[in-house]
Amino acid sequence: YGLMLLFAWLSPSQALYFHIGETEKKCFIEEIPDETMVIGTYKTQLWDKQTGSFLPSTPGLGMHVEIKDPDAKVIILSRQYGSDGRFTFTSHTPGEHQICLHSNSTKMALFAGGKLRVHLDIQVGEHTNNYPEIAAKDKLTELQLRVRQLLDQVEQIQKEQNYQRYREERFRMTSESTNQRVLWWSIAQTFILIITGIWQMRHLKSFFEAKKLV
Amino acid sequence: RTVCVACLLLCVSAISAFSQSLDSDFTFTLPAGRKECFFQTMKKDASLEIEYQVLDGASLDVDFYLQSPSGHVIATDYRKSDGVHAVETEEGDYMFCFDNTFSAVSEKVIFFELILDNMGDGEESEDWKAYVQGADLLDMKLEDIMDTINRVKSRLGKSLQIQALLRAFEARDRNLQESNYERVNLWSCTNLVVMVIVSGVQVYLLRSLFDDKRKTCT
């Protein structure tokens, strides 16, 4: 069991990685339906100037993880983690959630050449389910577990489709609103021009008559 | 008992014969005038597929290039709105970069998806099989059922991938439409203000011309 969990922690090194500067903040956007769980795992490695390569792990180096919900005002998580970490959140409103990472180290530039390698893996929805745990807890046979996986997948697809319908509705509302505004503005503009023209002519005509030019 | 174990092993080998496909997708904001690079460690003879789309930002285009571990640039795209590249990999770290240096003012939102195949560590994530409890009453029918279930699972996985792609397309259209909406609002108001000012100025200028003349005449 311990081995399985160990594998779960090591897998970020098989994942995507990127380099981050000292004061740099890297942000990722996850567009998800509501009531969806997101688990992110990251692993950091510091550049060692002496050996000219990345150290396998560095204690004491931490990453600051900040997660914002679609309204951009509520911060779900704003926490410091160690050099290898895992963050989890469940969305309560559908939309674009923003996950931002930045290093909490200030001494990096001094003895690391300012380079930090971050391995990142973000799992969403049914990918977050821990099947060994579920199999053990519910005492499932292999067939039952496979069917449970299928059910979870289908549920995720259904959630995404519902969310897709909501987004399409919003999209259609924006389109129709734009269309209407363009129409009304064109009509209004025509009226304003006609009225301004008439007013100008009347005003100038009476002005010239007053000045005894006409 | 031994028959059960043998059949279980048969099932396990039948399942791992169908290769494991890992994929991950990310959406991020690329600031104006910047370049962002990502790296992916690959094994020999695996396959890497990268698909990206620009979701938001002015002209909806970005430069892209993919570099192999030996430093050789495999693919480049100049100012494209979306693209897909698949490559048979060698051992090492592949680097791919999104370049927005040609744009000084507009930041881009970029979505990319990595599909890895034949990475050979499928067995690792299928470990849950070792932890299931009890044994099914095994005969040939069960293998057929497992076969069907595996096929359904892989198709559903593909559905999820396609959904992610469709979501990216829709997000791009929505962002485009929202920026159209804001543009229409802005220019309509500007137009109104300009028209009113211009008509007022015209009238005032004409009047002032005549007033001065009258003053100098008398």
Image (cartoon, coloured by chain):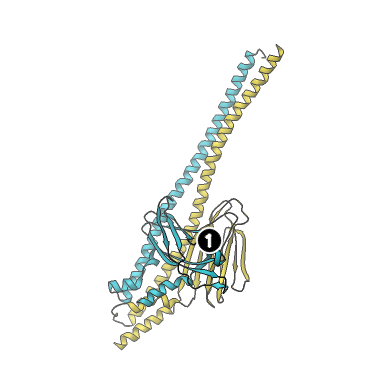
Chain colours: A cyan, B yellow
Q: Locate the N terminus of chain A and report the quarter of the image it occupies.
A: bottom left
The extreme top residue here reads B218
Horizontal relation, residue A175 to residue A144: left or right? right
Q: Residue B191 placed where, x, y %?
A: 57, 35
Determine the residue positioned at 45% across, 60% down. A64
Determine the residue positioned at 47% across, 71% down. A57
Determine the residue positioned at 43% across, 69% down. B155
Question: Is residue B121 or residue A22 the one in the foreground?
Answer: A22
On what subunit does the disc labeled 1 rest?
A
- Whether residue A169 is situated above or below residue A99 in the rendered picture: above
Q: Locate the C terminus of chain A and report the quarter of the image it occupies.
A: top right
- Whether residue B191 is situated above or below residue A151 in the rendered picture: above
Determine the residue positioned at 67% across, 18% down. B210
Question: Is residue A31 or residue A167 the one in the foreground?
Answer: A31
Instruction: Quadrant for residue A47, please give it.
Output: bottom right
How many residues crowd mark 1 within 10 Å: few (<14), some (14–19), many (20+)? Answer: some
Name which residue type carries label 1.
Glu
Q: Secondary structure at mark 1?
A: loop
The extreme right residue here reads B217
- Whether residue A126 is situated above or below residue B5 in the rendered picture: above
How many numbered discs, if any? Answer: 1
Report whether residue A114 is seen.
Answer: no
Q: Residue B175 placed where, x, y %?
A: 50, 51
Q: Residue A120 placed where, x, y %?
A: 47, 66
Residue underneath mark 1: A22
Report whether residue B112 is seen.
Answer: yes
